[in-house]
Amino acid sequence: MPDVALNIKVKDGAIVEEGLSYVISSWDETALEAALQITEDVGGEVTLLTIGPDKAAESLRKGLAMGAHKAIHVKYDEAKESDSFAFAKILQKALEGRNYDLILTGKQAQDTDAGLTAPMLAEFISLPQVTNIIRFSDVSEESITLYRKGDHGTEVIDMNLPGIVTVNDSLNEPRLASMRGIMMAKKKPLEEIELDSLDIPAEMRGKQGSMTNVLQFEKPETRKEGQTFEGDEADTVKQAMDLLVSESKFLA
Amino acid sequence: MTKILIVAEIKNGEIKKNTLELFSFAKSQGLESEAVLLGSDVSGQADVLAGQGASTVYIGDDASLEIYNTEQYTSLVIDALQQSQATQVWLTSSEMGRDLTPRVAARQGVGALSDVTQLEINVDEITAFRPCMATKAVQKCEFSKDGLRVISIRSGIFSAEETAPAPANTVTLSIPEGHSQLKVREVQVEESDEVELNEASIIVSAGRGVGGVEGCEFVRPLANELGAAFGASRAVCDAGWLPHKHQVGQTGTMVNPDFYFALGISGAIQHLAGMSGSKVIVAVNKDPDAPIFKVADYGIVGDLFKAVPVLREEVGKLKG
């Protein structure tokens, strides 16, 4: 997905492609780090799975360089046309016949900020879900204990495996790929799957398979230019507070 | 006919303001609304929802529902939905709403629009606006197929009308078995009796610049004196200076209060995305190039340890 830390320009109802740099969503990197920590602790292997155009392979190589064992790339040039519902359906197809104990992903993608795909997938493949975790412990063959940032505190949940978890980036600080990791990544298996081989009919793809549609992108409301105060705090704070009261009706 | 089923949220036994906002908005649009009310010992709140306009309140009241859990809550919302024959389900984009919205939609075989900040409704034709790309763009969206509309709406977008309770028309939901694949052991409530971030009209937030736990406690009295919620940046929460429930931003709570005081916060992208919808932003930071000054209405370049005592003094005068 595009790096949202950079400038994002909107023109004629669309995001301007020029100047975008493509990266792994930061919450997904957190999910990968958690998966790596789990396998380092209790064994097993980490498989990366992505659906996207050719350029998505770069992100998979980066994930392999961080330490993932293998990767699956479902090649889909029009991935952007699909909404969360359609994505979850394609993921369901891509997972058919595969074995896994735990599916980890970011709490939302940094480009859509929707946070819908993982719980929809969980429902489609009848797995339990725990979203927005900030910690985990007690990983076994059968279960994992998850600490979810809930509305009224941290919810402590034992989840049977297999299951789906989405992560909050407070969970960890993702590692950087080492030179050795980057070299090793070139030799790791990266399985390419054409969408056509997944038995996904036309009505499940793109806009046809989607339940929602983005009509257009718009610029967010820009904030009006603010005022800056420099100098002795005893004066600047008073000046700012006076304006806050007179202009902005603070505590009025 | 358009009918909205609103999933109510409860805290400390009372209906949360974010829920009242949804009822007020439904009423302002002339739409019929019903409520689903889930929790432990919550039935008494049905009259509050009726007062807000809920024509029927579907109640799931059981000790097992005290803490939110995906399995039982999804089943109960679906049960209420089937009885209600509502054409739309509205939730708030709280942590409960974020977990429940996609699961409910998927079980009904439909899509969802999440974290909506503007909503235009013409019967069941919906145009929704939602921020994306760390709030650097806004998506204008629609539902592209017929069927149930499932929408989660950000807190603080609509204003909540104050209404008196009214006798509710209630339907008791039978409690499904839960905990088959998930067992919720406990909720570790970190603090109580504080103003919640997504309910506050004023938020005072501490950033890395406060330097530690003592710095947080230096700032906290300002929040208390203002009746404000006490927020924090990710750096502060990750360092353990304050519990995570204080965290403002895409990783914590998305907020849009009337007044936001950012003290010692430089303004990381996810923090800005989570608070730049605030009506008025006041920032204090030593670094004149800090990104927070790009969104601040009143930017004070200076030392927060010198600024906070002056702020408290000024607030004291205003409060008389």
Image (cartoon, helix red, strand yellow):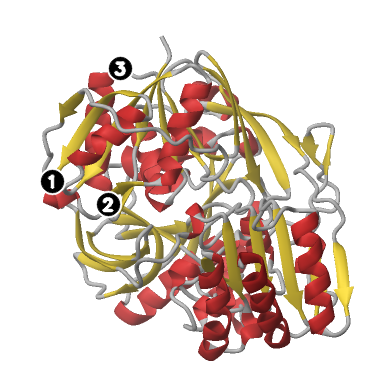
The answer to whether residue B257 is left or right of residue A36 is right
Q: Are marks 1 and 2 in contact (CB under 8 Å)?
A: no
**C-alpha separation, residue under disc 2 versus residue under disc 3:** 24 Å
- Indicate the quadrant containing the C terminus of chain B: top left, top right, bottom left or bottom right: bottom right
**Which mark sits nearer the N-terminus, 2 or 3?**
2
Q: Which residue is mark 2?
A: B68
Query: Residue A40: image x %, image y %?
Result: 38, 80
- Indicate the quadrant containing the N terminus of chain B: top left, top right, bottom left or bottom right: top left
**C-alpha separation, residue under disc 1 versus residue under disc 2:** 12 Å
Question: What residue lies at 75% left-to-right and 44% top-to-bottom?
Answer: A220
Give B56 or A205, whichever is nearer the viewer: B56
Q: Which residue is mark 3?
A: B85
Q: Are marks 2 and 3 in contact (CB under 8 Å)?
A: no
Structural crowding at the residue carrying mark 1, measured as other residues with C-alpha within 10 Å and reported as few (<14), some (14–19) or many (≥20): some
Q: Which residue is mark 1?
A: B62
The answer to whether residue B222 is left or right of residue A237 is left
Chain to which the residue tagged by mark 3 belongs: B
Residue farthest front in this picture: B320
Question: What residue lies at 64% left-to-right and 49% top-to-bottom?
Answer: A111
Give B39 or B42, whichever is nearer the viewer: B42
Label 3 sits on a secondary structure element that is loop
